[in-house]
Image (tube, coloured by chain):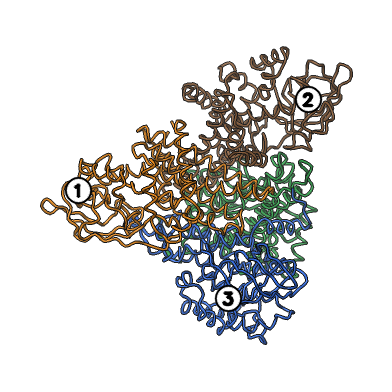
Chain colours: A blue, B green, C orange, D brown
Amino acid sequence: MKEENNILKETVAEFCDKNLDEKKIESEGITHGITELLASQGFLGATIPGKYSGSELDNTSYEIILEEIAKNSPSVAMKIFILNSLYYPSVKGTSAETTLSDAASGKLNVAVDFINRANDIKENAGKLSGTLINVLGSDAEKIILFNENTSIISGPFGYSDRDFMGFRGIKFGDITLDNTATVLDSKNRKGEILEASYGPLSAIALGMISGALQKAIDYTSVRKAFGNYLKDFEPISFRLAQFRSTESVLRSALYGEADPYYVFNLAMESIVEIARYSVNAHGGYGYFQDFGVEKFYRDAIVMKSIFYGNQELRKLAEHVYSEKINFV
Amino acid sequence: MKEENNILKETVAEFCDKNLDEKKIESEGITHGITELLASQGFLGATIPGKYSGSELDNTSYEIILEEIAKNSPSVAMKIFILNSLYYPSVKGTSAETTLSDAASGKLNVAVDFINRANDIKENAGKLSGTLINVLGSDAEKIILFNENTSIISGPFGYSDRDFMGFRGIKFGDITLDNTATVLDSKNRKGEILEASYGPLSAIALGMISGALQKAIDYTSVRKAFGNYLKDFEPISFRLAQFRSTESVLRSALYGEADPYYVFNLAMESIVEIARYSVNAHGGYGYFQDFGVEKFYRDAIVMKSIFYGNQELRKLAEHVYSEKINFV
Amino acid sequence: MFEEYDEYRNKIREFALKEFTEEMAAEYDRKEEYPDELRKKSLSLGIIDMQNPAKVMIAIEELCRVDAGLGIAVTTPYFGSEVIMLFGNDRQKEILQDVYKGKYILGLAVTEPSGGSDVAGLKTTAMKQGNKYILNGSKMFITNGAIADYLVVLARTSEDPNPHHGLSTFLVNTKSKGFNANKLVDKLGVRATNTAELQFNNIELNEDDLIGEEGKGFYYIMMFFNISRIYVAAQSLGIAIGALDRIKSYIKENDIKDEDSMFRLSDVGTHIEATRQMTYNAASYLFEFKPKPELTSMAKAYGSETAVYAAESAMEMLGDKSLYEDVQRIFRNAKIMEIWEGTSEIEKLVIARYILKGE
Amino acid sequence: MFEEYDEYRNKIREFALKEFTEEMAAEYDRKEEYPDELRKKSLSLGIIDMQNPAKVMIAIEELCRVDAGLGIAVTTPYFGSEVIMLFGNDRQKEILQDVYKGKYILGLAVTEPSGGSDVAGLKTTAMKQGNKYILNGSKMFITNGAIADYLVVLARTSEDPNPHHGLSTFLVNTKSKGFNANKLVDKLGVRATNTAELQFNNIELNEDDLIGEEGKGFYYIMMFFNISRIYVAAQSLGIAIGALDRIKSYIKENDIKDEDSMFRLSDVGTHIEATRQMTYNAASYLFEFKPKPELTSMAKAYGSETAVYAAESAMEMLGDKSLYEDVQRIFRNAKIMEIWEGTSEIEKLVIARYILKGE
């Protein structure tokens, strides 16, 4: 990794250390204050053009930011990802492009309904009514909808919160629409947008793997059982060491020449197991929010549930076989 | 990967295609003719200095050669590895260094007893008697012994062959000693030599993973069952695609900036599963030598059995925890 | 020996389906509170029969199948009762009867902040002074800790070079002076159960608070764990079947046909069948007083992995739909199975020891 | 229902330990030859009792535990006999008696070069001409193919839109004109068994060579596989226990204490216990004529994975010592379990279908 990247990595790590209280974020959400801090550091609008108050960073820098922040708070990393990898490409070149200014400077809360389970949404001359189910970022003022077209809807909305399993820093719930929607694009760009996001998603996953694992390595270095450190027990330290191998290989591949498809796939195939075992290594303490490790397990399975299903695996298989497959 | 590396890769692949009959090697061994061909191409003495008829290649080139050859014949790759990564560093700077000339040009068959189960070997004024058990390359004329010192023993030896589970191209058996041994070094260099070999070993493992997987992908692309191609069955193509992800990430890490320790570890943790499933994807045919896939499964487990045990995992854990661990 | 209970099993299943509504399960999960009215209702309906371990096991399985948080809450007020049943004096057994009647809630306090699975290394003391024992120390992760009326407490009563000796069990009234319980919150799952950290500050215990003989506590507790582990296996089995129920409904309702889902379904089902066979087989030895601890440990270790595997599979197969209440709650509940009543690490060492002993 | 056979089990174990010496196992593995003298010896000692499937299963398990190559060689000359037993005519049953007496070797020919697990897609035909059936086609991977005296052959006797219809089973004498067997060599494992590719070129079959009714062959064979799969589960169980035996010896002889080995030992032992419970449970339904095919499939699929896992674990735990004869042979033998008698892929689809059918 280049010197400048290492400096960025350290800067982000230091910022997290000082400013992100991950436990507070888990229980109280990402406050406006945190969002503004992220913006003032240039992390929030990492890839957004300078003319819209973004930092216009390259992909590697963006991924470094996501990874480092996800080590501390996957929720915050996900918020940055939603703006840069989902919202930004959705509004790019459209009439809503100018909203990026407020979004990148932390004044406007945006979301993208990529889960996209609209419940009887009716469209009448650009006017949408009905309920959007399970929107990650349901307290946003601008939400991108991937329906047949790509649309933007404007709030403020009435929304109802759900208890959410993962990424608890971000509001999650249903939105009742009674508003004007603007069609931004005549085709649904969800597919291509998600495809371009495998790198950034892998960076978040890698950060989560790294964060969970580091907690387990730290804990097993100081905690004793039966008169020995936990790390002195081979089944524990061997397993954590093997996970660190996976983490390290993934990182080298992500910032190296590997196909992001493949990196994402291996990250998704390892993340839950690593997070789960990192919880286990903490014994009973791992089960409590206070130790900051169980959130990685929750966030990991939510990430898989949202971003990695049958469709992604079909795409992966077709990528590997270099042809369209008629699955049975 | 650089252009020159890609050219080398293609050259080696072409060479294998034309000259290595992997089935014949499995049943008849690596003949003198093959060894000479490897030497004439400069593959045999890949890293050995030019003054000893070697090619003096850099590490990346060496690993590319190992990987490409292992895709076809892990035995041949192992033979090159034994010369370059075990024999060469053992004789380097010693009186036996000049043997490299003949070794790199294919005239002298060398081996290293890294399994090292000497059976009542007695030393009397540099004269060794007794039996070396399980020597990979038991038909060699020069064998390095890692006992308390690093020694070289000279043949030709009387040796008895064993049926060997893996790397069948290389002779495997016991050697009865009644000969003069020369002490090359006053300390056993086995540890540091093996440590330096994690990269090259990973390259062989990667080639094996790649070779097995490619056979499975090819087979499932053309073979039909129940009226569909095997690849049309998700559990088959998904799994193979996931293995290709692992392969691809490992390759990027090996030739990138990753710690070879970690690459080797992940390769060892995946190789048997990938080789096993590649056999399975061939149905009944996979169980027969003729399809060229079961050898990867045999070679994979042998590689793990020889190079990846409790000691390596302890080293890995200490590497991760950056300290000496008092294992329970 | 379990087939005769089919009718009882159906009764439990009906109770769970009727009482453990999604609203109630979600509410107690959110509030992280103990559902005391469910405990009373289950008693009044005769759901719990602590005299018959086979029935207890079936109840645990069927209740946890619907919701593990509520299921464990309903079956856990008796936690530790086997120790009293087997070794207690008359007064203690009377208290136990009151537990069974619903008057009191019981708990077991073994684990300590520094200890985890290392029972013999515990630091709580109950040293004798005259005809009293003075209890001092602290306990961690104690189920029912902040709601129990009585606790079975393991403490050191004498220093002995062998750390397994010198431990004793007591029945401690939580109204005693010097008792303090601090409810632990923000658990990942089983949030309808109560978990607490306890402090004992010079609690005075009488001689008849001692359960069984002084110095035998370690062995009593190990014997208890041999029994309670089978109940954890049953919890795991129930959770895993519950996850499979959701996967099946999802497949049927959405007419899922892809082979990847079929394979996952098959793997989950096979793991459950293996867990079921191992659990009931181990239980049949245990409940006939011919325990084979290695079989119990196998059932517990394997079963807890199965619960987690089934729950994670449900999450992944349902995709974003899993984010709705019930599946994600199953996921959060399952994890504790690998942790309590002996982590899987401990089980595996026990199992290895037995395998090496066998011929 | 299996405990009464403890004595029989001991007898088998003694036979295997005495006869399956390392020298003999290694020799037949190397030569890739069928050990006919062992077959005769096993018959003379009454090792095989095809009338009693429970005993067959125990024999398979205990013989494969010592060496799967020889164990399968000894128990496979009867392969396909259930088809004759259940559906054969008197002449066929007489031949079967001669098989049991050791005069003949039997085999079953279902799989085809293009077919693999797709039984209904087979291409071999036995079309009727007058009062003869004319057998044409080829078969692949046929156990005993080149040494059998008689083969139970599945062939298409009529074209039917439903590919499951129109198939019939025949008892074919391998001395028939037009029969050709090509022994397949260089197998990974179970090299003491004979495997062949067969050609049928206009073999004339009489009407009394037909087994059972014309057109019901597919169902006979599926019924047979429901039985034979449990025997594969028993092979797997035996192989896995054999691998565990070697791990245990290695640990004891070398005084291995590291916890990583203990964990691996525990995991292998737990998987074996799960396989044992599932296999015997499925067998108890099957042998009482209340088959539960999903339980058999689970036992087969899970068992084969366990055999491979145990064998690989033995290789890895013994490290370079595993390169000696017996452990590496176990490793090579184990793999076939996941392939023959229905690959694990097929089993899993069967299992999924049953799980979705259940309530």
Mark 1 touching mark 2, by CB under 8 A? Answer: no
- Cα separation, mark 1 vs mark 2, equals 78 Å
- Work out whether C32 lies above or below C261: below
Dot 1: element: helix
- Badge nearest the viewer, 1 or 2: 1
Label 1 belongs to which residue? C209
Q: Position of residue C243 (x, y in %)?
A: 54, 49
Q: A186 left or right of A246?
A: right
Classify residue D109 by image quadrant.
top right
Read off the chain for label 1: C
The reply to whether residue A281 is in sight is yes
- Work out whether A208 lies above or below C209: below
Read off the chain for label 3: A
Label 2 belongs to which residue? D215
Question: Outermost residue, right direction?
Answer: D130
Asked if badges 1 and 3 are on one and the same chain, I answer no
Looking at the rendered structure, which numbered label has been put on residue D88?
Answer: none
Q: Residues within 10 Å of mark 2 (few under 14, many from 20)?
A: some
